[in-house]
Image: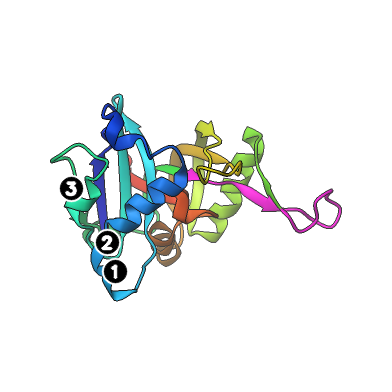
């Protein structure tokens, strides 16, 4: 696995005029793997948008290295970097505490007594979003020690549709309780709409 990052050239209107919906970012990510396109063998790529010190970044986790030149299509020249993620995964230990950041699409399926039984219902209230994360934690090999919702918006999926996704950013602290499940979650993501910038959790050791 490889973790890559590029700074989005937000000041260049010519470059980012197309980046008005999540589908455009999805296409940008997919076009960064020309060898996969040539072979017709598309793999799952997790990604999300981050803001750090006033700068916008595209963060990408993938089984293969992206083409850095293609990854800079909407990025600032010379800012695309990639590194092998496997050594980090190999250093994780059961019981270890980590700080995390996650961008996800919290939602649940309506029950029999719901007004929309069987439908996927977004979690809009903060307490519902945190409950969703606690439920995911149990299945993903970690215990949630603390968590906050630090961002929420409703970006559009496609340019000509009114479909909007429930994008929520979580930050907090966790403890690994099942190492195999936890590693699997880090590389496969959490929740729905992974192709559109949701589900990627990143972690760093607690200082």
Q: What residue is at 26 percent from the left and 29 percent from the top?
A: 12
In the rendered image of this protein, does residue 16 appear above or below residue 114? above
Q: Name the secondary structure under disc 1.
A: helix
Q: Please check the rendered image and state whether residue 42 is part of the magenta-colored stretch, yes or no.
A: no
Q: What residue is at 35 percent from the left and 46 percent from the top?
A: 203
Q: Please check the rendered image and state whether residue 110 is part of the magenta-colored stretch, yes or no.
A: yes
Q: Name the secondary structure under disc 3.
A: strand
Tell which circle, 2 or 3, labels the residue nearer the N-terminal end: 2
Looking at the picture, how far across and down is residue 194, in whole percent?
Answer: 47, 55
Looking at the picture, how far across and down is residue 162, in whole percent?
Answer: 61, 41
Distance from the alpha carbon under mark 1 to that under mark 3:
19 Å
Q: What residue is at 38 percent from the left and 40 percent from the top?
A: 18
Residue topped by disc 1: 36
Q: Which is closer to the viewer, label 2 or label 3?
A: 2
Front residue of this view, candidates 63 and 7: 7
Distance from the alpha carbon under mark 2 to that under mark 3:
14 Å
Q: Which mark is residue 33?
A: 2
Front residue of this view, candidates 71 and 191: 71
Distance from the alpha carbon under mark 1 to that under mark 2:
6 Å
Q: Name the secondary structure under disc 2.
A: loop
Mark 3 burial class by Cα count in 10 Å: few <14, some 14-19, many 20+: some
Q: Which mark is residue 81?
A: 3
Instruction: Give the magenta-colored segment's residue range.
Output: 103-119
Q: What residue is at 43 percent from the left and 41 percent from the top?
A: 173
């Amino acid at each position: 696995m490889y973790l890559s990052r590029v700074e989005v050239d937000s000041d260049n209107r010519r470059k980012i005029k197309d980046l008005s919906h999540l589908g455009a970012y999805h296409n940008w990510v997919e076009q960064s793997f020309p060898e996969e396109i040539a072979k017709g063998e598309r793999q799952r790529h997790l990604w999300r948008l981050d803001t750090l010190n006033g700068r916008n970044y595209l963060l990408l986790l993938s089984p293969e290295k992206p083409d850095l030149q293609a990854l800079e299509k909407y990025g600032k020249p010379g800012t695309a970097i990639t590194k092998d993620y496997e050594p980090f995964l190999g250093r994780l230990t059961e019981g270890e505490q980590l700080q995390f950041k996650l961008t996800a699409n919290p939602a649940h399926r309506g029950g029999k007594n719901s007004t929309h039984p069987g439908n996927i219902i977004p979690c809009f209230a903060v307490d519902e979003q945190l409950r969703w994360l606690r439920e995911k934690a149990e299945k993903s090999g970690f215990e949630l020690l603390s968590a906050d919702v630090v961002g929420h918006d409703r970006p559009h999926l496609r340019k000509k549709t009114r479909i909007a996704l429930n994008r929520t950013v979580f930050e907090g602290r966790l403890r690994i309780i099942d190492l195999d499940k936890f590693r699997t979650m880090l590389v496969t993501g959490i929740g729905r709409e992974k192709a559109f910038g949701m589900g990627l959790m990143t972690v760093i050791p607690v200082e």
